[in-house]
Image: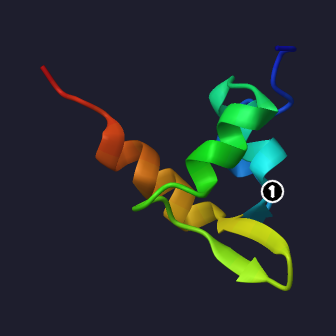
Amino acid sequence: MRESNFKNYDDLPLTLTAQEVGEALGISRAAAYELVRSKGFPHMRIGTRILVPKDKFIQWIEDQTEMN
């Protein structure tokens, strides 16, 4: 996977496509589509498009982060 164009949360668009989620997380496009369709992952549908609100995406990342 190529290097992300996103250097920090401020660089993210207001809503992210599955492809942008994959780029931000450093995962493949296929893995990103599987993730956004998974139960508990924040997304919304507009027609056939799946979009992830930036604020919900950031919160999801924080919720997934383990603190040891």
Does residue 14 appear in the picture of this structure? no
Question: What residue is at 69 percent from the left and 23 percent from the top?
Answer: 26
Q: Is residue 40 left or right of residue 46?
A: left
Question: What residue is at 75 percent from the left and 26 percent from the top?
Answer: 28
Where is residue 37? Give x, y as percent: 60, 58
Quarter occupied by residue 65: top left
The answer to whether residue 42 is above or below residue 34 is: below
Nearest to the observer: residue 55 or residue 42: 42
Total number of numbered discs in the rendering: 1
Q: Judge the density around disc 1: few (<14), some (14-19), many (≥20) Cα neighbours within 10 Å.
A: some
Question: What residue is at 74 percent from the left and 30 percent from the top?
Answer: 7
Quarter occupied by residue 9: top right
Where is residue 42? Give x, y as percent: 52, 66
Where is residue 2? Give x, y as percent: 87, 14
Check disc 1 and report the residue beneath it: 17
Does residue 38 appear in the picture of this structure? yes
As shown in the figure, which amino acid type bears the numbered disc 1?
A: Thr
Residue found farthest to the bottom: 47
Question: What residue is at 80 percent from the left and 56 percent from the top?
Answer: 17
**Which element is circle 1 on?**
loop
The answer to whether residue 33 is above or below residue 39 is: above
Q: Is residue 45 left or right of residue 2?
A: left
Q: How is the image coloured?
A: rainbow
Q: Is residue 40 left or right of residue 26?
A: left
The answer to whether residue 25 is above or below residue 49 is: above
Nearest to the observer: residue 14 or residue 42: 42
The answer to whether residue 42 is above or below residue 47 is: above
**Placement of the C terminus among the 4 image quadrants:** top left
**Placement of the N terminus among the 4 image quadrants:** top right
